[in-house]
Amino acid sequence: MARKDVTPEKKPSSGLLKKLGIGILGGVVGGLLTFGGLYLAMGSSLTGSNTTTTTTGVQNSSGETTVSNVKLDVTSDVTEAVEKVQGAVVSIINLQQSQTSDFGSIFGQQSGQDGQTDENTSDDSTLEAASEGSGVIYKVDGDTAYVVTNNHVVEGQSGLEVVLSDGSKVTGELVGTDAYTDLAVIKIASDKVETVATFGDSSALKVGEPAIAIGSPLGSDYANSVTQGIISSLNRQVTSQNDSGETVSINAIQTDAAINPGNSGGPLINVDGQVVGINSSKIASTSESTSSVSVEGMGFAIPSNDVVDIINQLESDGKVVRPALGIRTIDLSSITSQQQEQILKVPTSVTAGVVVYSVNNATPAEQAGLQQYDVITKVDDTDISSTTDLQSALYKHKVGDTITLTYYRGEEEKTATVELSVDTSINDTTDSSN
């Protein structure tokens, strides 16, 4: 019979058994201590709790569904940033005169028993809310607090009401406006103001960093709404016209934080709670040929560095003084090729610029020798393709600055040094005046 070699199991020695017993006992004791520590840390006891977590939810000892007692700490950079500035964000109500409504006798006029209105009150004297927007308190000076908002929020106003973050209403007084940058400053009494916002450096912004918008979308019923997104792009040239036909041009911050009607004038803040922009506009749709394309997440804000420059001038002078050449212009692109050949006689290589069609007397343009039908192609080193480009280039300077114009007179390219000694506040301010 074949033999099998079998290795028998070895019986442990008594000393080894003792060692194993001590190890097991130590593990049990350590586990009990750890288990007890966890219960103490969670505020629980070995006698059980009055709520039970099951696969069907949280229930008490009677089997009734209850709210979990777990408390979460959701503090984040965003919540801390909002907390810093939210108290400074306000709603702005634009009050305008209107014809007396059915409610006039209750809120606007005193009526006699015969239904006749008070002789001292005119029918059109009642002010009512025409529109609403947002703003942010940025300064307190003694008894006065200052609010920055958009020009289009206060446009056409006969009176202003400012709704503070606690819901109280105060009367606002317009300090000044600047249609070109769409900014305005309002002053209010400071006695109820508790929070003042701080401006951050918009030149330090990075594409992709978080951006938070605060304001009153659809009006003060939704005051202090917060939306979050990112900085989508910087230095977006956004040009439009306001209701008065004035050119609005913003070197804007683009963001995908939701901006809706009523958010205008409210702050765009960074994660440190600093105001880096004033929300101004958004693109909701765009027309391509005969169709309309809906657009999401394209909002624009005026950079804080530009805002600070403008509001300081508005506080000081009630307006922004900008230089002008004293000419009226038309875009070269709107001139037919036949007119360019027969009247302007510029080289065919010149395809963009602005045409001077009148020069005002005693202006920088006249002193520099500009004439009708000259075609301006550059301001300093900036190419000029349109009247808007020319205006933007001029508005980067101040009255008293000197610039160099490059232009064509017929086929000859010329340059002229121009001292900007005239400002737009005393000149024709139509779209084609520069």
Image (spheres, grey):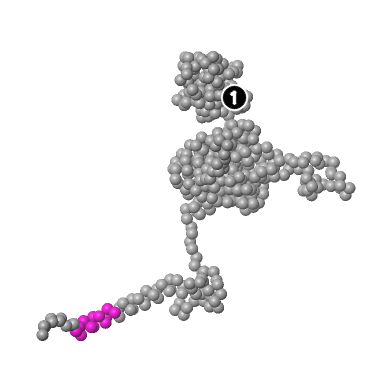
Q: Is residue 243 above or below residue 294?
A: above
Please report the bounds of the magenta region as a residue range.
Answer: 10-24
Residue 47 visible in the current orientation = yes
Is 412 on the left-hand or right-hand side of 315? left
Q: Residue furthest front?
A: 1
Q: How many marks?
A: 1
Which residue is more in the foreground, 86 or 231?
231
Residue 421: x and y, percent? 55, 22
Principal SS element in the magenta part?
helix
Say whether residue 102 is magenta: no
Circle 1 sits in a helix, a strand or a loop, which is it? loop
State which quarter of the image contains the N terminus. bottom left
State which quarter of the image contains the C terminus. top right
Say which amino acid is labelled 1. Answer: Ser
Residue 420 visible in the current orientation = no
Residue at the image point whose x is 50% and y is 41% from the top: 254
Q: Is residue 281 above or below residue 426?
A: below
Q: Residue furthest right?
A: 114
Residue at the image point whose x is 53% and y is 51% from the top: 82
Residue 131: x and y, percent? 66, 43
**Residue under numbered circle 1:** 433
Residue at the image point whose x is 50% and y is 54% from the top: 79
